[in-house]
Image: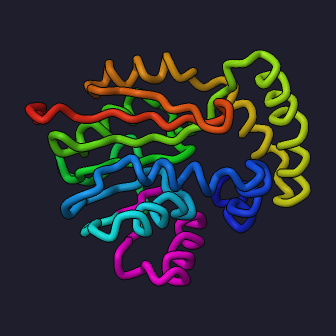
């Protein structure tokens, strides 16, 4: 599915979020450490938008990897890295976010944007993120959520169920993919439940930051310094 929609994926992200996805990714990128050389992996990187935001925000990143299971998404991402002059600083690889080939404690930060709800087992993905982090490392997950306010939630659900599939079909020619989008958002864990899942996976200092009235959230957690 993601291979099919790769050519129009970025355009639709910007259209359907009214351009807010740019600032969401910048905010997520700023959540990782601000000092010292950092090793970062962005799981389910898609077309590498969050990886690009990380590289722009943090010149001290010494190793930046984006991983995704869609080769077509990665092809778009590689072209974007070249166009932004970042190809020498970031690399994209194919792989499964729930079972990566990276060694234990390989990264100081692990990020993921709008991807964890698409994995077959979000808890297994959190376990993998925890494994990849060095002690003291940070996990930053940007994901869609539903507004807590009942009126805003109603309006957002109308947007998801009617507007998103229609525009998605018109631009990408793939109505099914954008019908899946609204269904996956509605069925995903709410902020409190997802924070509890992060804690069960071993993360500490877990928090959720609502964005744009709660239509998206940034989840943060860290790996205990003494937790190898």
Q: Is residue 183 visible?
A: yes
Taking depth in this image into account, of 144 and 9 the one nearest to the observer is 144
In percent of width and height, residue 44 lies at: 48, 51
The count of marks equals 0
Where does the image place residue 11, in percent across and percent down from the top left?
74, 63
- Which part of the image, by quadrant, shows the C terminus? top left
The coloring applied to the image is rainbow
Direction from residue 187 to residue 58 in the image, left or right: left
Q: Is residue 227 left or right of residue 86?
A: left
Q: Which residues, given as a range, are shown in magenta?
A: 65-91
Kindly tell me whether residue 69 is visible in this rendering. Answer: no
| Residue 86 is covered by the magenta coloring | yes
- Of residues 142 and 181, the one nearer the viewer is 142
Name the residue located 72 percent from the left edge and 39 percent from the top edge: 181
Residue at 63 percent across and 30 percent down: it is 145
Residue at left offset 64%, top offset 30%: 214
């Amino acid at each position: 599915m993601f291979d099919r929609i790769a050519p129009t994926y970025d355009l639709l992200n910007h259209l359907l979020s009214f351009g807010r996805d740019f600032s969401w990714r910048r905010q997520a990128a700023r959540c990782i450490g601000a000092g010292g050389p950092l090793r970062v992996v962005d799981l389910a990187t898609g077309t590498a938008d969050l990886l690009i935001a990380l590289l722009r925000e943090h010149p001290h990143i010494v190793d930046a990897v984006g991983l995704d299971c869609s080769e077509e998404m990665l092809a778009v991402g590689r072209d974007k890295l070249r166009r932004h002059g970042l190809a020498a600083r970031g690399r994209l690889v194919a792989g499964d976010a729930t079972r990566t080939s990276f060694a234990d404690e390989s990264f100081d930060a692990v990020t993921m944007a709008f991807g964890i709800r698409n994995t077959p087992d979000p808890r297994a993905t959190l376990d993998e993120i925890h494994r990849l982090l060095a002690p003291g490392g940070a996990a930053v997950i940007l994901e869609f959520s539903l507004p807590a306010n009942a009126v805003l939630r109603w309006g957002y659900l109308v947007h998801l169920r009617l507007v998103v599939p229609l525009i998605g079909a018109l631009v990408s020619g793939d109505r099914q993919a954008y019908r899946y989008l609204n269904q996956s958002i509605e069925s995903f864990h709410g902020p409190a439940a997802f924070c509890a899942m992060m804690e069960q996976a071993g993360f500490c200092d877990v928090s959720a930051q609502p964005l744009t009235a709660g239509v998206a959230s940034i989840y943060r957690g860290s790996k205990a310094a003494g937790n190898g």
